[in-house]
Image (cartoon, grey):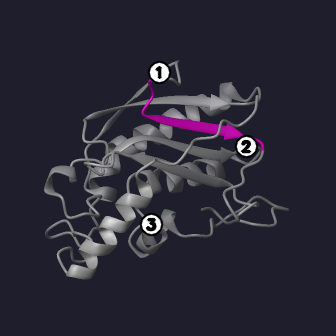
Amino acid sequence: MSRATVPLASGVATLGAVLAVVLAAGVVGPPAVAEGTGLPTVDRLANPAAADNPWGKRTVTVHVVHEDTESDRLDPLAERELDHWEANSPRYADSNVSFDVIGDRGPADLAIVFQADVGCGPERNAVGCSRTRTDDRTGRVTSATVWVETGHEESFTREVLRHELGHVFGLSHDDADEFPFMHYAIRGEPEGFDSDETE
């Protein structure tokens, strides 16, 4: 099975231009912080309506894709990590969300793709990558795809998946001081692995 290409949202450039103008005007300040916690919120646009989660809905549908025969190992791994995010998203990203794993990729909000080789832009040696599409008007996530490289130990694969889901929830590498799993370089890489970078 080959990796499906996920096109960028048509309005990403427009949204970027609008944000640049708004930021230049001083209307939007630094990212919002959950009161009393010091934790960054998902609401990078200071939009109180988006603080619950980037999708703007309580249940996010997920489809797990794998291009090899590791489904017996990868499906439960993905479900355990989704359970972890359900339990911890309020702490990690000031978000409250549940996941519903479905069998059809078409209507899924989020696709988790496990494949033998992951390349993200210039990072041809990445072990994980994530992309989101957003609604031009609301800034809400309409769909997201996370790619995770297979062939590594379970703990390493889960750490990569946790990191990439962090990006889907609006966390960045700059959040690594608060959430070490968001560090750009994954620690504890498998023996013989040359690059531990994630995007």
Query: Disc 1 marks which amino acid?
Result: Ile
Q: Give the label on residue 172, or none.
A: 3
Image quarter of the N terminus = top right
Q: Which residue is mark 1?
A: 102
Of helix, strand and loop, which mostly describes the magenta segment?
strand
Q: Are marks 2 and 1 in contact (CB under 8 Å)?
A: no
Q: Secondary structure at mark 3?
A: loop
Q: Position of residue 105 (x, y in %)?
A: 53, 25
Q: Earlier in the sequence, mark 2 or mark 1?
A: 1
Q: Residues within 10 Å of mark 3 (few under 14, many from 20)?
A: some
Q: Earlier in the sequence, mark 3 or mark 2?
A: 2
Magenta segment boundaries in residue numbering: 107-116
Residue drawn at point x = 40 percent, y = 62 percent = 171
Q: Give the label on residue 68, or none.
A: none
Q: Work out whether 89 lies above or below 181.
A: above
Residue drawn at point x = 44 percent, y = 74 percent = 174
Image quarter of the C terminus = bottom right
Say how many tags the image has.
3
In the picture, measured across the screen, residue 56 lies left or right of residue 9, that is left
Q: Secondary structure at mark 1?
A: loop
Q: Which residue is mark 2?
A: 150
Q: Position of residue 98 (x, y in %)?
A: 32, 35
In the picture, measured across the screen, residue 198 lies left or right of residue 138, that is right
Distance in Å between CA atoms under marks 3 and 1: 27 Å
Q: Secondary structure at mark 2?
A: loop
Q: Position of residue 74 (x, y in %)?
A: 64, 33
Q: Position of residue 40 (x, y in %)?
A: 29, 67
Q: Residue 26: say if magenta.
A: no
